[in-house]
Amino acid sequence: MSTPAPEEKHRNWWIWVSAVLALVAAALLVWALSLKSDRDSAQTELDKKVDVQVARNGKVPPEVQRVAFDLVGSMSSDYDRAEILLAFINAGAVDPATRPAFVSAAESIRSSHDQNRVLAALVKFERR
């Protein structure tokens, strides 16, 4: 008759372990959401800088291009990566100084379809 007491203690231990794991999972979720928010803020800031530079000069300076190409490499969507790189090509904003950074960003695209779209557009742009 004294055997139920050890089972309750054993059960309480698992409840505490479960509670700690739930707290760790919640903390990881908050951390992941803050990283996404930071990345989105950086992307918004970059968009503003590019818009200001294009409005002032009609082109994007090489240092802003390099930062943009680095940010493109950190994006998760291949389609979004391709669209941003294509926007740079369509704006005529890829120059010989930033071409290696552009190609590196294009190589980070895992989708062969999107990667081919970007590289084909780059070849057409360079033939003009």
Image: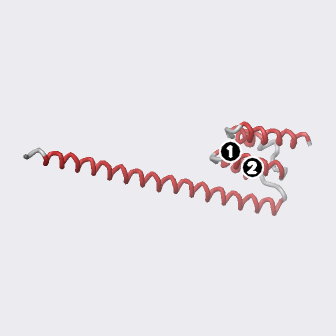
Q: Name the kind of residue labelled 1 in the image.
A: Asp
Q: Work out whether mark 1 precedes mark 2 in sequence or the reverse, and give the earlier one.
A: 1
Residue at 82% x, 48% y: name it: 89
Residue at 79% x, 43% y: name it: 97
Asked if labels 2 and 1 touch by Cβ distance under 8 angstroms, the answer is no
Mark 1, residue position: 78
List x then y, in percent, for residue 74.
Answer: 63, 46
Compared across the picture, whether 122 is left or right of 84 comes to right
List x then y, in percent, for residue 88.
Answer: 79, 50
List x then y, in percent, for residue 112.
Answer: 72, 36
The outermost residue toward the right is 128
Q: In the rendered view, tell whether residue 60 sits above or below residue 96.
A: below
Q: Name the kind of residue labelled 2 in the image.
A: Glu
Dot 2: within a 10 Å radius of its alpha carbon, few (fewer than 14), some, or many (20 or more) residues?
Answer: some
Residue 124 is drawn in which quadrant? top right
Compared across the picture, whether 35 is left or right of 45 comes to left
The outermost residue toward the left is 1
Residue at 87% x, 43% y: name it: 125
Q: In the rendered view, tell whether residue 51 sits above or below residue 75.
A: below
Quarter of the figure that contains the C terminus: top right
Residue at 41% x, 51% y: name it: 25
Q: CA distance from mark 1 to mark 2?
A: 9 Å
Mark 2, residue position: 83
Q: Which mark is residue 12?
A: none
**Circle 2 — which element?**
helix
Compared across the picture, whether 43 is left or right of 99 comes to left
**Circle 1 — which element?**
helix
